Amino acid sequence: MKRLMFIYNPKAGRQRVRGMLPDLLEVFAREGYETTVHPTMTQGEATKLAAQLAPGYDRLVCCGGDGTLNETVCGLLSLPEDRRPVLGYIPTGTTNDFARTLGLPKSTEKLAEVACGGVPRAVDIGDSQGRFFTYISAFGLFTDVSYSTPQSAKNLLGHFAYVLESAGRLLNIPSYHMEVTVDGERTVCDDFIYGMVSNTLSVGGVMSLPRDEVKLDDGRFEVLLVRPPRTPKDWQSILAALNAQTAEREDGAVIGLTASRVTFRCDRPVAWTVDGEFGGERQETTVKNLPRALTIACGL
């Protein structure tokens, strides 16, 4: 019988997984898997479980939010490539940005079917100064909201918790004077209030890019840089650019481009977020693409 390792975060989202477990395990059994279940109790536990136990299984499925997915991926990437099982993902977090990019279904049964039997697809993984990420590494405006908002608030209010946490910040926006070098060829020097390197269709459940421009396995990331707005009209320009549905752009306040390697240098330490978790504070950060580093079950 095939063996499946199921790692889940019981606190993610509104603790949805508690009600989903019987249906998930039934689908796994129906698909011919003997399942071992591992709930996570502490931060970083998914990484340790994946690194230590995953080689003994035919399929690894993780269940939780973007942070749980990130931890599991980090554990798998610590293993030799030929010892990494295919990864399945069942999203139960508050925002679940990467789930949309993977084309995952909504129902519990369909999610389980894709996780244990979906199309295996090699995807690029990011390395942000030694921290792996599946879909985004970012700095600046609101990037600390996901890791500074208490889990209790996320569980109670869902995505609205992020909105409430962000609402009071628009009047005092910090900017960072940066030198941004793209693929060792192009350098941009300016002040920026926000910057991201991503491999996703959705960011924060709000910003989105068209599916035909975001390719998970092309060895390149989408890079977005936002300059400080000077007037209310500048905000309108920024919002219009973010909704322009194109990766490559130069719209005054917004720069959009693609790259496989980006280096950010600032005159002071900058805090980064990696897949919604704190990713360190540095004056210089290099983000690079690791092409087709992981195989994950997709719904596409």
Image: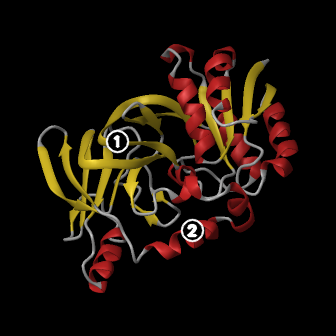
Q: Nearer the viewer, residue 108 or 94?
A: 94
Residue 207 in percent (x, y) is at: 44, 65
Q: What residue lies at 44% left-to-right and 34% top-to-bottom?
A: 131
Residue 182 in percent (x, y) is at: 19, 44
Q: What residue lies at 79% left-to-right and 48% top-to-bottom?
A: 17
Three-letter amino acid code at the position of disc 1? Arg
Three-letter amino acid code at the position of disc 2? Glu
Residue 228 in percent (x, y) is at: 27, 70
Which badge, 1 or 2, comes first in the chain's sequence?
A: 2
Asked which quadrant contains residue 47, the reply is top right
- Image position of 8 (left or right of 248): right
Label 2 crowding class (10 Å Cα cut-off): few <14, some 14-19, many 20+? some
Vertical comparison of 50 with 255: above or below: above
Q: What residue lies at 58% left-to-right and 47% top-to-bottom?
A: 66
Q: Nearer the viewer, residue 160 or 293?
A: 160
Distance CA(mark 1)–CA(mark 2)? 24 Å
- Image position of 150 (left or right of 220): right
Q: Which numbered disc, 1 or 2, marks the residue closer to the eye?
A: 1
Q: Nearer the viewer, residue 31 or 170?
A: 170
Residue 123 in percent (x, y) is at: 45, 36
Residue of label 2: 165
Q: Secondary structure at mark 1?
A: strand
Residue of label 1: 282
Instruction: Quarter of the image for the N terminus: give it.
Output: top right
Q: Nearer the viewer, residue 5 or 145?
A: 145
Q: What residue lies at 55% left-to-right and 32% top-to-bottom?
A: 73
- Image position of 272 (left or right of 90): left
